[in-house]
Amino acid sequence: MKALLWLALMGVMTGAQAGEEDSTPCDTVDTDQQAYACAAFNRHTAERELKAAFDDLLQRVNEQSADPAQARELNAGLQAAQTLWIRLREADCKLETAAEKRGGKALEAALNTCLAQRSDDRSEYLQSLAQP
């Protein structure tokens, strides 16, 4: 499981590190503690990008809709879908990390890695919606 965690962590690092920051906790990952810090960083980065993608989608819907009532209805539907998706993401990641020892750093790193990957995927999906 640890080898799988490292592979997943490396995949997320390439996506999440492409942000605006020059130095990250993922620059040097030689210890378990550094791997944990990198996974946490990737999760926070991915969730920040997810929020930005969702906010951008809401703005695109508002700009493209000629009818304000329709825009409000679409935005309400998007909010509901996002809330459900977040619950699904949390449940899926808990299932994926169920084999990890409870309360350990490996569990937290695996959970953070899963959440980051799912958030990155969702961000891409949201960015594809309501394109002009």
Image (cartoon, helix red, strand yellow):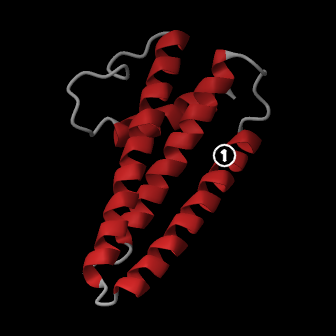
Q: Is residue 85 left or right of residue 72?
A: right
| Residue at 62% across, 31% down | 110
Label 1: which secondary element: helix
The quarter of the picture where residue 55 lies is bottom left
Q: Is residue 86 left or right of residue 95?
A: left
Residue 119: image location, x then y, percent: 49, 49
Dot 1: within a 10 Å radius of its alpha carbon, few (fewer than 14), some, or many (20 or more) residues?
some
Q: Nearer the viewer, residue 117 or 91?
A: 91
| Residue at 42% across, 51% down | 50
| Residue at 48% across, 58% down | 122
Q: Which residue is mark 1?
A: 90
Q: Is residue 28 left or right of residue 96?
A: left
Q: Is residue 69 visible?
A: yes
Residue 106: image location, x then y, percent: 65, 21
Numbered circles on residues, count: 1
Q: Is residue 2 visible?
A: no
- Give the position of the C terminus as an image quadrant: bottom left
| Residue at 58% across, 67% down | 81
The quarter of the picture where residue 125 lies is bottom left
The quarter of the picture where residue 115 lies is top right
Residue 93: image location, x then y, percent: 67, 43
**As displayed, is residue 111 above or below residue 76?**
above
Q: Nearer the viewer, residue 78 or 41?
A: 78
Q: Nearer the viewer, residue 96 or 75?
A: 75
Q: Amino acid at mark 1?
A: Glu
- Give the position of the N terminus as an image quadrant: top right
- The single residue placed furthest to the bottom in the displayed view is 66
**As displayed, is residue 2 above or below residue 82?**
above
